[in-house]
């Protein structure tokens, strides 16, 4: 999948690559990239185990990294691609960052921010769910199957 | 106010001290401490300006610092004292950390997590609001009055 054919799938592939790197390190396989004008500003994956830090989600790290790269406070012109629907913490952080758009793969019916009613994101943030959802979900299922098997 | 007379006010005073330190640095004056068995594990304040990071709230830093001190993943036996009602991001993080109890000072009717309906905190987390609310709120009002004046 090339950038020109389908940018959303192209960047979700990059996020999936991060998720696979997480899996290889024994982390819950969630990956994220932050994109601005077709350039990737940050590539991150879940690091909760390595950092012993329950807040070290892929999205949190990607927000911090992207704002550092941009030297800006807000990510209004950026899109976050993430393999799993952001949790409420990450959605709150994306709200503070005023991110322009969120694209996620697998839905998270238990912990995802869309379960919560009320203002979480910035009112101008666009959201697209379900991009490459099957691949994103399959990776998570493989991981948890391995853990529980 | 001593620890023995009124532990909640004692520890909120410590959080207020952090909030004042934030104010002195030009940060929005919010402070937090994490306490376990009457000992302070972490003292943090808002650092969004210094770190150019919208996620660097007092609570986020306090969670990360306290888990590092404890060497544990969860803060089930800890209490977080914070001068302002946690936002949805911080509440989500406190949910992941499974914190035992949250005590906050000033309410935040615009950004506070109690505005949002749905599961944000861990079901076992106890919440007490309004401890030294006037002092906590006064500091914030002074800060924003100075900014807007």
Image: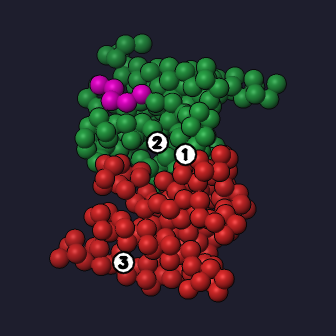
Chain colours: A red, B green
Residue A118 in picture, x, y percent from top left: 61, 59
Crowding near pointer 3: few (<14 within 10 Å), some, many (20+)? Answer: many
Residue A7 in sight from this viewpoint: yes
Mark 2 falls on what kind of element?
helix
Q: Residues within 10 Å of mark 2 (few under 14, many from 20)?
A: many
Left or right of A134, for residue B114 = right
Query: CB under 8 Å between callouts 1 and 2?
Result: yes
**Which residue matches tag 2?**
B60
Say what secondary structure mark 3 lies in: helix
Left or right of B90, for residue A53? left
From the image, tell me which residue sits under label 3.
Answer: A139
State whether residue B78 is above or below residue A20.
Answer: above
**Where residue A107 sits in the image (x, y, percent)?**
48, 75
The percent position of residue B99, horizontal first and vertical second, equals 35, 44
**In terms of secondary structure, what is the magenta stretch mainly?**
strand
Q: Secondary structure at mark 1?
A: loop
Q: Nearer the viewer, mark 2 or mark 3?
A: 3
In the rendered structure, the answer to whether residue A148 lies left or right of residue B133 reads: left
Q: Which residues are magenta?
A: B39-43
Between the C-alphas of marks 1 and 2, the distance is 7 Å
- Which quadrant would residue A37 be assigned to in this image? bottom right
Q: Would you call the spot at circle 1 few (<14 residues within 10 Å), some (14-19), or many (20 or more)?
A: many
Is residue A28 or residue B74 the one in the foreground?
A28
Residue wearing tag 1: B55
Q: Is residue B137 left or right of residue B148?
A: left
Count of all numbered marks drawn on residues in the image? 3
What chain letter is assigned to the residue under label 2?
B
Given residues A59 and B60, the one toward you in this image is A59
């Amino acid at each position: 999948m090339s950038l020109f054919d389908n940018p959303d799938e192209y960047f979700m592939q990059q996020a999936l690559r991060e998720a696979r790197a997480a899996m290889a390190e024994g982390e819950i396989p969630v990956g994220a990239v932050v994109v601005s004008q077709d350039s990737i500003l940050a590539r991150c994956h879940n690091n909760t185990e390595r950092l012993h830090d329950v807040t070290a989600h892929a999205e949190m790290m990607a927000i911090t990294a992207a704002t550092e790269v941009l030297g800006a406070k807000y990510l209004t012109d950026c899109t976050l691609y993430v393999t799993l629907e952001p949790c409420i913490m990450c959605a709150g952080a994306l709200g503070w960052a005023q991110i322009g758009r969120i694209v996620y793969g697998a839905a998270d019916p238990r912990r995802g921010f869309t379960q919560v009613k009320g203002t979480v994101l910035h009112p101008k943030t666009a959201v697209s769910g379900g991009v490459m959802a099957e691949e994103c979900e399959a990776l998570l299922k493989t991981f948890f199957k391995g853990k529980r098997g």
